[in-house]
Image (tube, coloured by chain):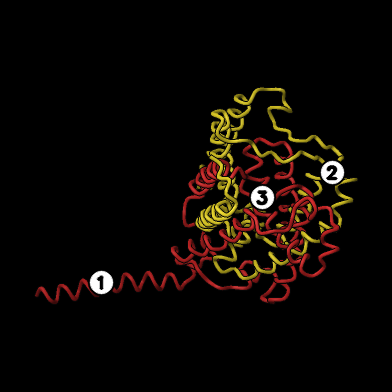
Chain colours: A red, B yellow
Amino acid sequence: MKRSLFSLAALIALAITSGAHAADLGGSNDPELSGPAWSPYLVGALIGVLSWLTFLFSNKPLGASTAYARVAGMLGKLIAPRHTGSLKYFQDNKPKVDWEVMLVGGVILGAMIAAWTGDELMARWVPPMWAQRFGSSLWLRLVVALIGGALMAIGARLAGGCTSGHGISGAFQLSVGSWVALICFFIGGVLTAMIMFHT
Amino acid sequence: MVEKNPTLQLVLGLVFGLAFGFLLQKGGVAKYHVLVGMLLLRDFTVMKVMLSAILVGMVGIYALRHWGLVKLQVKPTRYAANIIGGLIFGVGFALAAYCPGTGAAALGQGNMDAIAVMVGMIAGSYLFAEASGWVARKLNPIGERGELTWPQLLHLSNPPVIIGFACAIVGALVVLWKFTG
C-alpha cells in the first residue's frame, strides 16, 4: 500500500514536471521571447548602487562606448601606426586596455553567468523578432547590425557618450548635455524602429 | 577611497563589468525583442531600468558628494554635437537593437549577431577619429557650454532640483507600474 502510494506520487510528480517541460517547449521559456528574469525596477536600482561604487573606488561613471574606440585605436596602431597616431581623437584618448575596456569585457562574462544561472544561455545568430519581419537571412541581419553599430559609435563619439555614459551616468548627475543626448537617442531610435517595423 | 594602483583599477573595471553585465542580463535588456520593443513603445522594461538607475544613482551620488566622498564626472554640454550625435546614435540603435553596453551583454547570453554590432562599433569609432579634428574645430564649438548641470542652468541650488527630478521620476515609475506592471 505504502509502495503503491509512493509510485502514484512519483507518477504525479513526473506528470507535473513533464507537463511543465512540454509548456517550455511550446515557447514560453524561449529566452528570446520571455521578459526580464528579475524585476526591472530592482535591476535599475542595483545599477544605481553599482554606480556609487564605481564613483567611490574608481572615480569613474559606468560607460561602455569609449571601450570600442580604444580597441579601434589599438587595431589602428597595429595596421597603420603613423596615420592612427596623427588623428586628434587618438592623441587625446590613447589607445590602450583601460578601465572601460575591462568593464566591457566584464559585461560579456557577467551576462554569460547571468544567462547560465537563469537557464537562458543560447547561441543564436538571427533574433526571432527580426526573422519574423525581415526573414531568416543571416547576411541581411549581420549587415544591418554592422551598419547600426558603426552609426552608434559615430553618434556616441559626437554626442560624448552612449546609453550608459549619458543615458544613466550623465543623466543622474543632472548634466544638461546628457539629458539632451538621451532624448535624442530615443527620438532617433523610435522614429527608425517605427519605420523599420511598420507593416 | 579611490584606488591609485593602475593594475588594481583594471581588476576593478573587470569586477564592475561583471556586475553590470549580470544585472543587464537579469533585467532582460540584453534581449532583442525587449530593446526593439522599447523603441516601438510596446515594452517599457528599458525605461523602468533606466529611470530606477537614474533615481538611485542621483540621490546616492549627490549625497556622497555632499559628504566629500566623490567628485562629479560631468561630460561637457555641446548642444549641436549632443543633438546631432544623439540622433545618429538613435538611428544606429534601432538598426542594431543592442546599444554599446547591452550589446556586450547580448553577446554574453548568446545573441551572436551582437558580434556584428561590436565590429561595427569598432569600425565606426575609427571613422569618427578620422573626422575628429574637424568635429573639434567646427562642430563642438556650436552651443558649447562646458560642464553644465540643471541646477546651474536654472540658477538653483542642488537640493530643490534633485527633489524635483526625484518626484518626476517616481511619478513616471508609478505610472509605468500601474499600466504595465
User: Which element type, helix, strand or loop, lies under badge 1?
Assistant: helix
The span from disc 2 to disc 1 (Cα, nearest Å) is 69 Å
Q: Residue furthest top?
A: B156
Q: In this view, does A158 lie above or below A70?
A: above
Residue positioned 60% across, 51% down in the render: B6
The answer to whether A39 appears left or right of B61 in the picture is left
Q: For marks 3 and 2, give the CA distance.
A: 20 Å
Q: Give the quadrant of residue A104.
A: bottom right
Which type of secondary structure does the marked residue at label 2 adopt?
A: loop
Residue situated furthest left in the rendering: A1
Q: In the rendered structure, which amino acid carries the disc numbered 1?
A: Ile
- Identify the amino acid type marked 2: Asn
Q: Quadrant of the C terminus of chain A?
A: bottom right
Which circle, 3 or 2, is nearer the viewer?
2
Distance between the Cα atoms at labels 1 and 3? 49 Å
Chain of the residue on which disc 2 is drawn: B
Amino acid carrying label 3: it is Thr
> Which residue bears the numbered disc 2?
B140
Q: Are marks 3 and 2 on the same chain?
A: no
Q: Disc 1 or 3, which lies upstream in sequence?
A: 1
> Given this view, does label 1 or label 3 mark the residue nearer the observer?
3
Q: Residue B31's spot in the image, x, y percent?
A: 58, 61
Q: Mark 1 lies on which chain?
A: A
Q: Name the residue under label 3.
A: A163
x and y percent of residue B162 in the render?
Answer: 60, 29
Q: Which residue is drawn at 87% across and 51% down?
A: B133
Whether the residues at callouts 3 and 2 have beta carbons within 8 Å, the answer is no
> In the depicted view, which residue is nearer to us: A142 or B2?
B2
Q: How crowded is mark 3: few (under 14 residues within 10 Å), some or many (20 or more)?
A: many
Q: Position of residue B32 (x, y in %)?
A: 61, 62
The numbered mark at residue A12 is: 1
Judged left or right of residue B28, residue B115 is right
